[in-house]
Amino acid sequence: MKSSPRFTTNLTLLVLVLLFAAAPAVLAQDPADVSSQELYDSFKANAEKTWKNRMKQLDCCSFTATSLYQLKAHKIGSNDSSDYNPDDYSFVHGEIACDFPRLIGHTVGNEGKADEFHTDWGYKENYTFILNKKTLSDEWSIERLEPVVKRAKHNDLWKFMTSKAFLPRGNPESFFEMYASAVLGEFLLPQGVPIMSLMTSPMCVVDKYEKIENGNLRIHFTIDDSVVKDLSEPLPFSFRSGRIDLTPNDWRVVAVSVFSPDGTYEESIQNEYKADGETPFLSSSKHKSIGATIYSEDSFTCEQSQETTDPTRYTLSYYGLPEPEFVSETNRIRLVLIALGALMIGFAVWRFSRRRSAEQ
């Protein structure tokens, strides 16, 4: 008995309706219901796109951050901080603003102490600078002032975060290092290694992955030195094994521990995030280093917002200092080239008009 075309059509529509109805439930599946294999497969398939989108959220919009940095150092076997003079600790307060490729930072160290210092550093499209002064009432002195040879671009930033073999030479390199540490801290592992650089390296071997509390994904890895000979510029991983905890779906680094080859040295990072609307931002991070002779801790807390920063904040003029001469010279050259271009276009239009008139 043949089924009627209408029956077949209705059945097809019913199946499609059921599939579409079930799709949101599948897409919104609780990480707790996903196996570790599915979670890891999703990480491998989606991490790069997710990380790029996350970086774009951070570097394409302007935001300001205020952080407090504290460093403690102890000898192994004496973890009691009461044995140490408070003056041995270093407190740094900082403010950071960025609007890629512009970046400005202000830090105050050990305020009110004999070794108080103030440092400001800035990156613009055409020059970079570092300023220093001893106390708040002192005048700024220029420690470094350099023209930008090559303007930083987003593609170069991703290359920097994925492999040091692709580092652009010249000025942007220092910009990317500063930008990564100041803005992209949530992507950094101990010793400043970007997680993208590790996970995309042929030296990184994933030994095990597992689903842990809160549905997070934990990756256990080792570094395989045997592939170094296959790299034109090997990645400098000083650690040889470790584990990384990542949030499901957006793959933010929650915790990481790395170990030296002989197991006598360990570094770890613990990150916490605070949601600002739908976007989570890194709010605090704790870093520990444990070795044969030293035990150290440092931590910072951060408040972030998406307020737009006045463009003049990224200039030397903001500090009452003159703009560099090479910038004025560059502007003059640019104006001359624009004028010459306009003159050539005008001359071409005049000749074309004369020719049209003569033909008529």
Image (spheres, grey):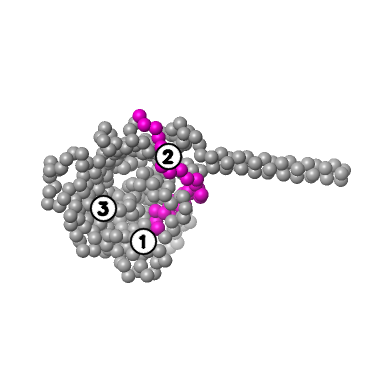
Kindly identify which residue carries mark 2: 142
> Is residue 245 left or right of 172 when viewed as pictured?
left
Q: Does the magenta stretch include residue 223?
A: no
Q: Of the residues under marks 2 and 3, which one precedes in the sequence? A: 2
Could you tell me residue 74's position as x and y percent?
A: 17, 48
278 and 86: which one is in front? 86
Q: What stretch is highlighted in magenta?
A: 137-164
Q: Of the residues under marks 1 and 2, which one precedes in the sequence? A: 2
Q: What residue type is labelled 2?
A: Ile
Kindly identify which residue carries mark 3: 256
Secondary element type, mark 2:
strand
> Is residue 77 left or right of 29 when viewed as pictured?
left
Residue 11 is drawn in which quadrant?
bottom left
Mark 2, Cα crowd under 10 Å, few <14 / some 14-19 / many 20+, is some
Could you tell me residue 180's position as x and y percent?
A: 38, 48
Kindly identify which residue carries mark 1: 235
Secondary element type, mark 3:
strand
Q: Which residue is drawn at 33% across and 33% down?
A: 135
Which of discs 1 and 3 lies nearer the camera? The answer is: 1
Mark 1, Cα crowd under 10 Å, few <14 / some 14-19 / many 20+, is some
